[in-house]
Image: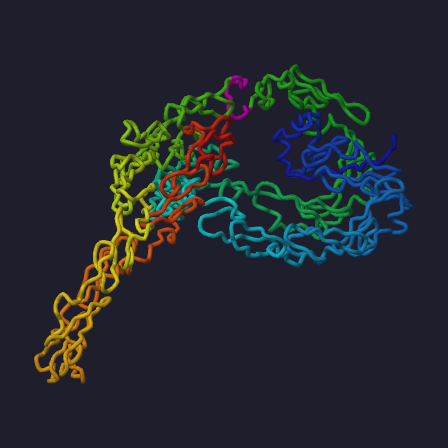
Amino acid sequence: MEKFPVQRPRRRWIAADKCSQAVLTQAWRRDSRNNAAIAGLCVKYSPGQAARVCREGFLGDYCQYRNPCENNTCKHGGTCETTSLIGKATCRCAPGFRGDECQYSEAHVCFVSQPCLHGGTCHPHGQDTYECACAPGFTGRDCQWIDACTSQPCANGSTCTVSGNKFSCICPPGYTGQKCEIDVNECAASVLCQHGGTCVNVPGSYRCQCKPGFTGHRCESPYVPCSPSPCMNGGTCHQTSDFTFECNCLPGFEGSICERNVDDCPNHNCQNGGICVDGVNTYNCRCPPQWTGQFCTEDVDECQLQPNACQNGGTCTNHNGGYACVCVNGWSGDDCSKNIDDCFTASCANGSTCIDRVASFSCICPEGKAGLLCHLDDACVSNPCQKGALCDTNPVNGHYICTCPQGHKGADCTEDVDECAMANSNPCEHAGKCVNTEGSFHCECLKGYTGPRCEMDINECHSNPCQNDATCLDKIGGFTCLCMPGFKGIHCEEDIDECLSNPCVNNGVCLNKVNRFLCVCPPGFSGAVCQIDIDDCSSTPCLNGAKCIDHPNGYECQCATGFAGLLCEENINNCDPDPCHHGECQDGIDSYTCICNPGYMGAICSEQIDECHSNPCLHQGRCIDLVNGYQCNCLLGTSGVNCENNFDDCASNPCVHGDCIDGINRYNCACKPGFTGPRCSVDIDECTSSPCHNGGTCINEINAFRCVCPEGYHHPHCQSQADGCLSNPCVHGNCTHVASGYKCVCDPGWIGDYCSTEGNECKSNPCQNGGTCEDLLNGYRCTCRKGFKDKCQTDTNECLSEPCRNGGVCTHYVNSYTCKCQPGFEGTNCENNIDECTESPLVSTCCVWREAWSSCVAHFIREWEFS
């Protein structure tokens, strides 16, 4: 084991009366930290002056510290030195070594070649190994490379890695380039958005702007507003149109999707600095430590709640919103925890060290200085004291003081002393008999005393009569026990019961401890004395927007409308009893919704839908309303589901001299001029009216006649040569005289030789598709059947409004349409999603539930084969 020198501490000057406090006077003390027996001798030198001398291996003002050099760790011949009186040590290394424990040779590569470059610090690890701690901006084993990543060249959150003096960037998805500075245009690579969605490039990614009816990151899902419900925090979703919805929020929430918790803290009642903590449809107050209660209006008695609120003997005084401490001398601060630094105003001489104490200070003098303030030269440097006397410097005047060994006296301790012959000064105390000896004396002590001068009372504390870590003070013929806090009695054997004052409130159970008490609080209370009523509502136990009311050791939930249960966790079933007549009831929050069976409608599905209301039967077919359907009874000559097929009665060309107009189980013949009869087969004899005058002969022609007049008469009616217009023959027209007589130019809407016949504009059957023609003067009016307009030749296309939903195919008919639904949907407009997993009798295998739709992995027996 290596040997090392140990410094011997000098004696410490103290006030002489300190020796009377039994701190160290010729007594052993027990160090509670290291359980080591420590001793020191308190020696008086002159009136008012004394010094403590520690045993070898200990140091400190009260010899309380072990000398750290006893466990020497200095290697390679290093010397252990204590640097102060607080138990710290350093190693003074032998030449050729260094380190905290002199563990490294100066021949180590760290100290010889200094391998760490660019300001790096070399840390030895073994005899030949080391590690470099590089300065910022450098890297490598010897800090030889510039750290290219120091300038943070990689952009957009990419990771920079160093290889030699170069860097490389690992880009996150959506970026590229040497420094990840280029945004990847995902929209240019491929078609990412489905169902016609528009791809929009954004930094590092892309997003799809979906067409109405689709949703999802890539527009991949059909959009059904409330499936699933977008309403948050228990809100109820109601579909308002094909692509819109609205959310009915629970109390305490707001926003288009109930995403915001309504802040209940505005206009709160938290006082005295209490912080309002928002809850759901309520709030709580978080009080500062000085206040308590629901609204922080009750003062906390810190002096009762915290027995040690004022430390180091300070006196605690409670007041509203806090407390105050009155500190004893030497302490300060709000809780008397700060030791006043007496060294701040101390006047220790230069080079000395001031040690602060409680309400005092002491000066640690350097070598060669002495005195209370280290302001005097040490007179003992010249060793003036003889006979092995102990030399000390007077702290007042700087003169040396020789403490002579027994049997010697004088300024330099060179004179022999007859201790027994000294006048009025028996060296033996307590009536001991003095016996003079050569160079000394000895005392014959009375019974009960001992010691070289009978000065020592027999130590009654030697038997450790004081219990519970009490301090025993020896007295003449007895002892006194200084009890630890929490104990009393002659031997400190009684534990003081701190529970006698009943400190625990609210029925808390007090458990007595050493110098303290512990309150076991009943459920619902907490705190040092059970003074805090625990807020059982702080965890927000009430569900579905209920209001929580705190009670001692409990709470009460006031439920929002539509909920019940201890925690308002039960949604009241508004479907019991079932209000829906012909449909399925779906329960909501304080409401219900009836999903009507096909063919029914209304809030409670009590109204049968009249499918005949739209007049689907054509060609005067009779419509019979059925449940979720209708039946057309067609007239003779028509057929089809909607009587849309009219048999062509003109197919046999029955009209001889005319145009055939097809009707319903009949036809009409529009005869050419000059013919009449049901089939236009009879030629009209225009000579029947004897139109030829003055003996003229009438010859019948097709749609006309011709008069062969006698001489002197002229066509067209063999009238005289006189002006024929004088008799106003034209009833609804203008008469024009011509060489052969006159000519009538008829007004619009009139025909005939005399313009006396009203023209029938309906004769040509201008109203098509079964429309009814009403003849007017010089015109007509068509009354069309439903589904036609103008001259009844234009059929209204109901499919243009795209009535079929969910991918259904629209087929146009006259005055109607039908939707052929995709598999899994039904209804007039394919608006109902079939739950094949519970209803369809045609599924022969299994059903699988998918995100917002259901599909059946099944073999269909017949339905789709026939559709």
Give how far across and how far down residue 335 sits, in percent.
50, 41
Q: Main secondary structure of the magenta part?
A: loop
207 in the magenta segment: no
**Along the line of sight, which residue is nearer the eye, 10 or 544?**
544
Locate the N terminus and report the quarter of the image it occupies.
Answer: top right
Q: Residue visible at 56% across and 22% down? A: 481
484 in the magenta segment: yes
The extreme front residue here reads: 711
Looking at the rendering, which quadrant does residue 35 occupy? top right
Q: What segment is highlighted magenta in the picture?
A: 482-493
Is residue 287 shown left or right of residue 82?
A: left
Give how far across and how far down residue 549 sits, in percent.
33, 33
- Can residue 319 be seen by looking at this rendering? no
**Along the line of sight, which residue is nearer the eye, 463 or 110?**
110
**Along the line of sight, which residue is nearer the eye, 857 or 480?**
857
The extreme top residue here reads: 447
Is residue 474 shown left or right of residue 239?
A: right
Give how far across and how far down residue 51 sits, in percent.
70, 36
Is residue 618 shown left or right of residue 172?
A: left
Is residue 589 shown left or right of residue 105?
A: left
